[in-house]
Amino acid sequence: MVYGVWLRWGLLYVGQTLEAERRLRDLPVGESHHLANTFPPEIWHKVLVVAWPKLAEAQPLAEKVAPDVVGLALEHLLQAKLHPLTNSERRTPDGGWRQVAWETSRSRGARTAHEVIDLFEAVHKIWNQAATQLTGEWNLSPACRVVFPGEVLSDEQQAP
């Protein structure tokens, strides 16, 4: 699956994982995710998850491209299109920062991106629709879910 994390002002992070069930449980509360070390989940506005293997456009890729590489390619394409804050710059050896140049990347995801274009377009369409959701849990399709961590955390704090 691919996922995004927003703060109220915009998209913070785009990632991917092969452990969808764990991420669906962990992400809304920031458990076991490196992003929570810098941006605590209490300040996350929403988490959007697209389980791309559930989309029809994923089926033709099943025989051609390994699922982990499909995930990397989708992550690369989403980052290149959306420029999330924490994915957009990298540390330099001297402690400074440099812009990520997705168009010149030689990563496995970048090298495979051209093979997943139809799937990316389907993911991006669902992503854009779901990203406009303002509150509450929302399901656009069986492949997409939006969760609002502040609501999840306050529900857990109110539980007996």
Image (tube, rainbow, N blue to C red):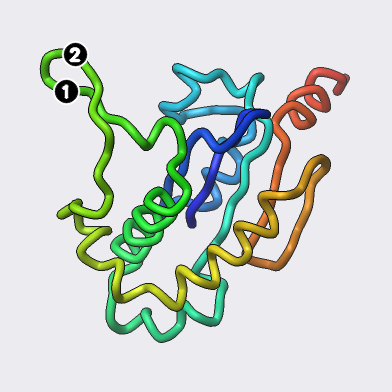
Q: Which mark is residue 133?
A: none
Image point 27% across, 49% down: which residue? 102
Q: State left or right for residue 143 relative to residue 61.
A: right
Q: Is residue 133 above or below residue 43?
A: below
Image point 41% across, 31% down: which residue? 86
Task: Give the quarter of the image for residue 134.
Answer: top right
Q: State left or right for residue 49 relative to residue 15.
A: right
As rendered, which of 86 and 103 lies closer to the eye? 103
Q: What type is the residue that disc 1 sits on?
A: Thr
As rendered, which of 63 and 7 lies closer to the eye? 7
Residue 10 appears at what percent x and percent y?
60, 34
**Residue highlighted by disc 2:** 95
Q: What type is the residue that disc 2 sits on?
A: Gly
As helix, strand or loop, the secondary structure at mark 1 comes to: loop
Contact flag, marks 2 and 1 (Cβ < 8 Å): yes
Q: Quadrant of the C terminus?
A: top right
Residue 79 appears at what percent x and percent y?
40, 48
Residue 28 appears at what percent x and percent y?
63, 34
Q: Residue furthest left?
A: 93
Dot 2, how many residues are within 10 Å of its Cα: few (below 14), some (14-19), or many (20+)? few
As rendered, which of 124 and 56 lies closer to the eye? 124
Image point 50% across, 71% down: which residue? 121
Q: Is residue 120 above or below residue 49?
A: below
As helix, strand or loop, the secondary structure at mark 2 comes to: loop
Q: State left or right for residue 128 relative to residue 34.
A: right
Q: Which mark is residue 92?
A: 1
Q: State left or right for residue 16 relative to residue 94.
A: right
As rendered, which of 83 and 159 lies closer to the eye? 83
Task: Give the quarter of the image for residue 153.
Answer: top right
Image point 78% across, 52% down: which residue? 138
